Image (spheres, helix red, strand yellow):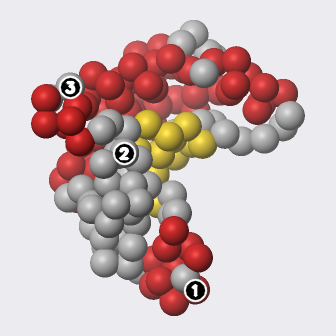
């Protein structure tokens, strides 16, 4: 994973690191640990400037493409875990600069809650972006 991120940066592109858990992991209570590991692996010992410029999407596998969605509270909690994990190597200031998006089956109906929460800075819109009306409803709010 780390080598892939390095290659993306060498080509002057901005990666979006997507992290999330399966439904089974969520039910077993290991979702938070999985997300922490997924964030820590590519971040590692990177400089604070790199971390501050990162874009990370919380995209729970059980919700993405399935039409299921987390609650705004679950989204905020997961994104707070991501920010907390980023603060470990880079500091709270760098972690506060990271754009964290929610990307689990974002639709006009499910997009009303998380943006504006302390740790959710936007959406990573998948299939709904293919429908102009649906995408406009998400974008306009």
Q: Which residue is mark 3?
A: 30
Q: Nearer the viewer, mark 2 or mark 1?
A: 2
Image quadrant occupied by the N terminus: top right
- Residue 7 position (above or below residue 117): above
Q: Which residue is mark 2?
A: 61
Q: CA distance from mark 2 to mark 1?
A: 24 Å
Q: Is residue 30 left or right of residue 86?
A: left
Q: Is residue 122 left or right of residue 15?
A: left
Q: Position of residue 25 (x, y in %)?
A: 23, 32
- Residue 119 position (above or below residue 89): below
Q: CA distance from mark 3 to mark 2?
A: 14 Å
Q: Position of residue 92 (x, y in %)?
A: 42, 26
Image quadrant occupied by the C terminus: bottom left
Mark number, residue 10? none
Q: Which residue is mark 1?
A: 132
Q: Residues within 10 Å of mark 2 (few under 14, many from 20)?
A: some
62 and 136: which one is in front?
Answer: 62
| Residue in the image at 49% along x and 73% along y | 128
Q: Secondary structure at mark 1?
A: helix
Q: Are marks 2 and 1 in contact (CB under 8 Å)?
A: no
Q: Secondary structure at mark 2?
A: loop
N-term mark: 3 or 2 = 3
Residue 87 showing in the rendered view: no
N-term mark: 1 or 3 = 3
| Residue in the image at 35% along x and 29% along y | 35
The picture quadrant where one finds residue 68 is bottom left
Q: Residues within 10 Å of mark 1 (few under 14, many from 20)?
A: few
- Residue 6 position (above or below residue 89): below
Q: Are marks 1 and 3 in contact (CB under 8 Å)?
A: no
Q: CA distance from mark 1 to mark 3?
A: 37 Å
| Residue in the image at 58% along x and 28% along y | 51
Q: Residue furthest bottom?
A: 133
């Amino acid at each position: 994973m780390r080598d892939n991120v390095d290659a993306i940066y060498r080509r002057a592109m901005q990666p979006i690191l997507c992290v999330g858990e399966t439904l089974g992991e969520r039910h077993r209570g290991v979702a938070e640990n999985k997300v922490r590991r997924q964030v820590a692996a590519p971040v590692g010992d990177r400089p604070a400037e790199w971390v501050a410029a990162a874009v990370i999407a919380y995209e729970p596998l059980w919700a993405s493409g399935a039409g299921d969605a987390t609650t705004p509270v679950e989204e905020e909690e997961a994104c707070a875990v991501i920010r907390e994990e980023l603060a470990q190597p880079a500091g709270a200031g760098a972690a506060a600069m990271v754009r964290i998006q929610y990307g689990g089956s974002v639709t006009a109906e499910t997009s009303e809650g998380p943006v504006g929460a302390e740790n959710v800075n936007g959406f990573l819109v998948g299939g709904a972006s293919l429908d102009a009306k649906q995408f406009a409803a998400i974008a306009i709010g």
